[in-house]
Amino acid sequence: LDPKDVIPAVLLQTGKKEVEKTDEKEEVEQPEMKTKEEIQKEREEAKAALASDFDLYLTRASKAESAKQVDDIVIEFFHEWNTKGNRRALAHQLLSVQRTKLHLLIPHSRLIATV
């Protein structure tokens, strides 16, 4: 029976590692104050990430075919994406589908009626 199997690794560490860790903690510098430009840039990146997530959501919404998929998409919309602009984008996405894809008419009408 090996003690490494029974005793957690945290308790098996030597004193040297603990000393090194305390030295590392002392060397940590205080975070610098961010400028307004950096804050604005971070906000723009966050908005871009959200926009790309919503674009993926719109793609999934336009490809949903079963009632179960549509219901899950509607629930996700109300929990995460329910804003006026996103409702407008969703309606535009669903109403701009090619007219040859008649199999999507029923799921899209279900989604629009629920939202």
Image (cartoon, rainbow, N blue to C red):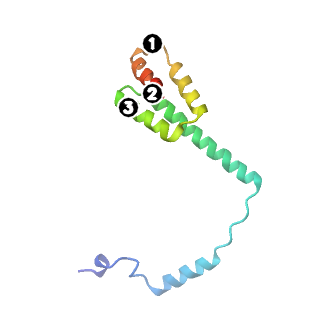
What residue do we see at 29% from left, 76% from top?
5
Q: Quadrant of residue 89?
A: top right
Q: Are marks 3 and 1 in contact (CB under 8 Å)?
A: no
Horizontal arrangement in the rendering, residue 84 relative to residue 8 (left or right): right
Q: Are marks 2 and 1 in contact (CB under 8 Å)?
A: no
Give the residue at mark 3.
69
What residue do we see at 56% from left, 30% from top?
87
Q: Residues within 10 Å of mark 3 (few under 14, many from 20)?
A: some
Q: Amino acid at mark 2?
A: Thr
**In the image, residue 88 above or below residue 46:** above
Q: Residue furthest top?
A: 100
Residue 8, position in %: x, y? 35, 77
Indicate which disc residue 100 carries: 1
Give the residue at mark 2.
114
What residue do we see at 73% from left, 63% from top?
33
Upstream in sequence: badge 2 or badge 1: 1
Residue 22, position in %: x, y? 56, 81
Residue 78, position in %: x, y? 49, 37
Q: Amino acid at mark 3?
A: Gln
Between the residue at mark 3 and the residue at mark 2, the CA separation in whole angstroms equals 13 Å
Depth order, front residue of 57/17: 57
What residue do we see at 49% from left, 35% from top?
57
Indicate which disc residue 45 carries: none
Depth order, front residue of 98/86: 86
Mark 3 or mark 1, whichever is nearer to me: 3
Depth order, front residue of 24/90: 90
**In the image, residue 83 above or below residue 4:** above
Q: Secondary structure at mark 2?
A: helix
The N terminus sits in image quarter: bottom left
Residue 98, position in %: x, y? 49, 16
Q: Amino acid at mark 1?
A: Thr
Horizontal arrangement in the rendering, residue 1 relative to residue 91 (left or right): left
